[in-house]
Image: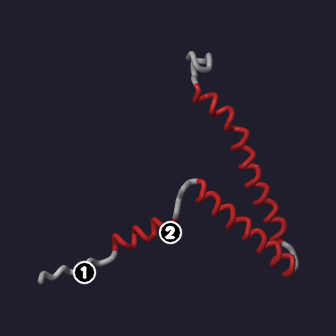
Amino acid sequence: MKTTGSAFGTKALATVHGLPYAMMLWGMVYFMLAFSYQVFTSTSTITLATTGSAFGLVVVFALWLTYAARDFHMLIRLLAWLRARRPRAKQTGP
């Protein structure tokens, strides 16, 4: 109670300060869903190809940054998984 002067402590303070950021992120997600619905439902092929390519590029970069921020390296995990599954060669003595 000494830290923040409330009975809830710093956890409530962190939650209150994190909510606007979380709501902004969810708002951006829903905006992109609505925008993509409007674009992809009734457009010409040229517009669809251009917007689809740009949308795919944005999604790839967003996922890449998310994985990088979480320190999730797929290649390292994949190599470790492959090494664990690799059959061991039998050791023959001299």
Q: Which mark is residue 80?
A: none
Camera-side residue of 25 and 75: 75
Q: Kindly identify the amino acid type of the residue bearing the numbered disc 2.
A: Leu
Camera-side residue of 31 and 86: 86
Image location of residue 73, percent across then percent down: 52, 62
Label 1 vs 2, first from the N-terminus: 2
The part of the image, by quadrant, that contains residue 48 is bottom right
**For the residue labelled by badge 1, is the local secondary structure a helix, a strand or a loop?**
loop
The extreme front residue here reads 94
Residue on which disc 1 sits: 89
Image location of residue 47, percent across then percent down: 86, 76
- Colouring method of the image: secondary structure
Write the residue at 50% across / 69% down: 75
Write the residue at 73% across / 39% down: 20
Residue on which disc 2 sits: 75
- Image quarter of the C terminus: bottom left
Q: Is residue 49 above or below residue 10?
A: below
